[in-house]
Amino acid sequence: MADEITTDQNDERQPDEEPLFDVLIPPGVPRSVIFDVVKKFDVEVVERKQKLNFANMEGDERELLAFRGRREVVEQVEKYMIERVRAFIGE
């Protein structure tokens, strides 16, 4: 899973507020994992346009879901999500 943590490019926060970061949710992540993350961590699910750079989708832009929150939280979310997906598929 190649997730990435990026800053919120449409950030409408005040100058004195902490910046928000996104971790993309790869297509195919079970809904149960997404719901679990939202209950367990202080993040929200948002839509993000992302260019795809693999197979026959080179340059295509898709609407993907992402978890948005403070950097240290989304770093924990990324690890947790990967663990839960691996457990779900039985690795």
Image (cartoon, rainbow, N blue to C red):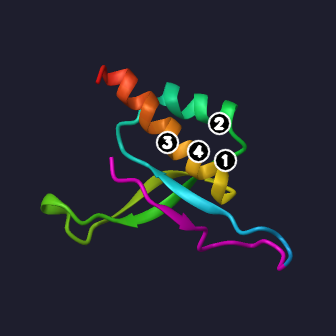
Q: Quadrant of residue 53?
A: bottom left
Q: Which residue is mark 1?
A: 44
Is mark 4 in CB contact (under 8 Å) with mark 3?
yes
Find out whether the residues at labels 1 and 2 contact each other: C-beta distance under 8 Å.
yes
Give the Cα separation between the discs numbered 4 and 3.
5 Å
Q: CA distance from mark 3 to mark 2?
A: 14 Å
Q: Three-letter amino acid code at disc 3? A: Lys
Q: Which residues are magenta?
A: 1-15
Residue at the spot 51% in from the left edge and 25% down from the top edge: 32
What amino acid is labelled 4 in the image? Gln
Label 2, residues with CA under 10 Å away: few <14, some 14-19, many ≥20: some
C-alpha separation, residue under disc 4 versus residue under disc 1: 14 Å
Residue 72 figure quarter: bottom right
Q: Which mark is residue 76?
A: 4
Q: Residue at x 40, y 65 (%)?
A: 50
- Residue drawn 49% across and 42% down? 79
Which label's residue is closer to the chain start, 3 or 2?
2
Residue at mark 3 to residue at mark 1: CA–CA distance: 16 Å
The image shows residue 56 at horizontal and vertical percentages of: 13, 61
Q: Nearer the viewer, mark 3 or mark 2?
A: 3
Secondary-structure class at tag 2:
helix
Q: Earlier in the sequence, mark 3 or mark 1?
A: 1
As for residue 10 lying within the magenta part, the answer is yes
Whole-number angstrom distance, CA of label 2 to CA of label 4? 12 Å
Assess disc 4: are there few (<14), some (14-19) or many (≥20) residues with their C-alpha within 10 Å of its C-alpha.
few
